[in-house]
Amino acid sequence: MCRQQAAVNFSKTSLHESRVKANLPDVMDKIAIGRGNQQLGQFTEEEVLAGLHSGQFFLTDLWWKTGMEKWESLTTFPGADAAQSSISAVVKTPSENGDATIPWENESLGVVQRFWQTCVGIFTDPWETFTKMPTSGGYGKPLLFALVGMAFGAVGNGVFQFIINVAQFSVQSTDETAGILGAQIVGMVPGIVCGIPFAVAIGAVGLFIGTGIFHLLLMLFGAANRDYEATFRAWAYSNGLLQFIMLIPCIGLLILMTWGIVIQIVALKQTHRTDYWRVICAYFLPTLLCCGCLAVIGFMLVGALSSMDGNFLDQIRNAVEQATNE
């Protein structure tokens, strides 16, 4: 009896020690869920299936429970396929339930109301908005939202440039040049009008290219838990709002360079349900590479100029002075 009791105590102690060493939960009736190097918590079987259905968990996440030798992908979890199939069916028809989508994809609302509510939601609470955003369902609706925002931004930019040019012409004009300046102002209108659709078309192409670049960067840092379409939808909605804000002269650009960056990072983070540091690294890597290339080119130019003969630099200086005097 004593030997049996000692054996039981030894087995319990060994099991507990092995869990501690493996950083596994000491809960018999719970299922541990992990993502990357982070443990998300311990859940019941029903909670895990509900999380798969709602998008809280992904098939790429890992799970473990008592009796398993190692962590396994949620693709092996009982009922995981059915849960993922059900969520895919819901995402394909988001407009049937206003709580499962964003206003722009809720067809029960008017177009103006849908656009305005989506802009307000993204600007004031991007966390909630992009958590609700369906990660599939086609490219059409997010692309249209982005194009509308780009069109408003292009119109605002064109009108602002027109006003600035008119003000400059008014200051510089005299009685003799008034007719010429007036003709120049009138000639600017067709250019601005034709430039708006051209800017929107270029923006649409850049939207797909930019999405591809950032999706590859997200994959590089292990943050792409969704496909290209999901990244496109997040990128299109966030950029549509930011282009719309460009209607506001000067202030729009300031918002774009500050809060706009936060919105885009949150959009990618919430869409892919990943870590902030992964998205931030992917987001700023192109900027760092560009700055690094410019720094290298700058050092090369400085080195080349410093190695030149002094007489050569004097000749350049004299040539510039002569051209200025003429």
Image (cartoon, grey):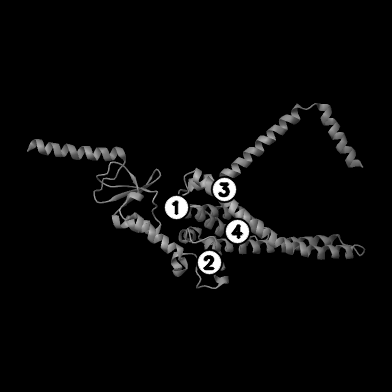
Label 3 and label 2: CA atoms lie apart by 25 Å
Label 3 and label 1: CA atoms lie apart by 19 Å
Q: Tell which circle, 3 or 2, labels the residue nearer the N-terminal end.
A: 2
Q: Which residue is mark 1?
A: 273
Whether residue 184 is visible to the viewer of this picture, yes or no, is yes
Horizontal and vertical percent position of residue 157: 70, 60
Label 4 or label 1, whichever lies nearer to me, is 1
Badges 3 and 1: C-beta atoms under 8 Å apart?
Answer: no
State the mark number for residue 242. 4
Label 4 and label 1: CA atoms lie apart by 22 Å
State the mark number for residue 213. 3
Label 3 or label 4, whichever lies nearer to me, is 3
Q: Amino acid at mark 3?
A: Ile
Residue in the picture at 59% in, 51% down: 210
Label 2 or label 4, whichever lies nearer to me, is 2
Q: Which residue is mark 2?
A: 104
Q: Amino acid at mark 4?
A: Leu
Secondary element type, mark 4: helix
> Is 179 placed above or below 62 here?
below
Q: Is residue 1 left or right of residue 259?
A: left
Q: Amino acid at mark 2?
A: Trp
Label 2 and label 4: CA atoms lie apart by 16 Å
Label 3 and label 4: CA atoms lie apart by 19 Å
Horizontal and vertical percent position of residue 35: 39, 47
CA neighbours of label 3 inside 10 A, class few (<14), some (14 to 19), many (20+): few
Horizontal and vertical percent position of residue 105: 51, 66
Secondary element type, mark 1: loop
Secondary element type, mark 2: helix
